[in-house]
Image (cartoon, helix red, strand yellow):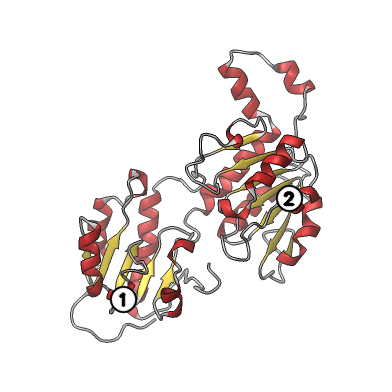
Amino acid sequence: MSRPPADGPVRVLEWIRSPIRMWTLPRELVSKLAEEVPQVSVMSPATREEADSLLAEAEVVLGFLVRPENFARARRLRWIHSTAAGIGGMLFPELVASDVVLTNGRGLHADAMAEHALAMMLAFARKLHHARDAQRAHEWTQSRTWEEAPAVDSLAGSTLGLVGLGAVGSAIAVRARALGMRVLAVRRRPAPDPAPADEQWPLSRLEELLPRVDWLVLAAPHTSETTGLIGGDELRLMKSSARLMNLGRGALVDEPALIDALRSGRLAGAALDVFAEEPLPATSPLWDLPEVIVTPHTSGLGPLLWERAMAQFTANLRRFIAGQPLENVVDKRAGY
């Protein structure tokens, strides 16, 4: 991606702000960007109104400023970088049809999300969620742990089904196989070499995969193809002893169908980090089902998250300045 000759530095407009502090880019990292890449001018406005007014000057937008209502102002814009992996909310028709390149934070959360997935599987296998409940009640439940359903389980020798084998799915597969699990993955474009899974299948074989797995982990993006991917029909194909983990997006799962499967015993359990509505409403039955582990969209959190996010962007920014191909380019029409 070459930058045409221009006077002055590359103009980068940063807008990563949220009412939730953890999702706001620390100001010291914005200052560090300007120090590390002297060929850029970094604009970091205090308000959205100021950011909108500066959009006409920006060649690069770091963050989530660009929307349908202000896109026409972005006459110089050539590249948008999202520090998140999910970019579904950014893909409005005008941007998709434009020449503006969109990149994302793909791979940034892979290790954390893989460890989270393994932690959830181990929690179910070792009944740690029940142990925590018993601890809170000051109950010694040694006999119940052994005698009552669900039985104490093991990851070794079990089969993991992965929906999605990108950076996150691949990181899960590596760790799962190290623990003695067999890994079957479905993805949009299976590779001839199945590694790091044992087998790679096209998404069209999902119904064939579901009855075979003991654990199903969703690590796919939210696209038109994956909306409602796991519904009542799919859940009925799974073993009653199987457990579902959703780390992708809430829209991948039909939540009422999942709740029904869990209540009726047609599914042994679910670990959910993403939901159709977030925060998960207090009235959701998912909070109280005994074989459900709810985490508040935290599977991607890990040490030095923002430092790693900015290192990823900075490396790409140097490529942009040098006219080199960018990494993590999103296929805007496919949605990931």
Vertical order, 238 against 131 (above or below): below
The three-letter code of the residue at mark 1 reads Ala
232 sits left or right of 247 in the view: right
Q: Is residue 44 visible?
A: no
Q: Residue furthest left?
A: 8
Q: Where does residue 286 sit, x and y in percent of width and height?
A: 60, 36
* Circle 1 residue: 72
Question: Within 10 Å of the Cα at label 2, are there few (<14), some (14-19), or many (20+) other Cα atoms?
Answer: some
Q: Answer yes or no: do the residues labelled 1 and 2 have beta carbons within 8 Å?
A: no
Point out the tag, 1 or 2, that comes first from the N-terminus: 1
231 sits left or right of 168 in the view: right
Q: Where does residue 308 sit, x and y in percent of width and height?
A: 39, 55
Q: Is residue 84 visible?
A: yes
Q: CA distance from mark 1 to mark 2?
A: 43 Å
Vertical order, 273 against 81 (above or below): above
Between 111 and 201, which is closer to the camera in this rendering? 201
290 sits left or right of 303 in the view: right
Between 158 and 251, which is closer to the camera in this rendering? 251
Q: On residue 232, which mark appears?
A: 2
67 sits left or right of 202 in the view: left
Task: Give me the residue at 20% from left, 55% from top.
Answer: 46
Task: Give me the residue at 24% from left, 74% from top.
Answer: 56
The part of the image, by quadrant, that contains residue 269 is: top right
Between 91 and 29, which is closer to the camera in this rendering? 91
Q: Residue furthest bottom?
A: 5
Kind of element beneath mark 2 = helix
Q: On residue 30, which mark appears?
A: none
Vertical order, 314 against 10 (above or below): above
Vertical order, 156 against 40 (above or below): above
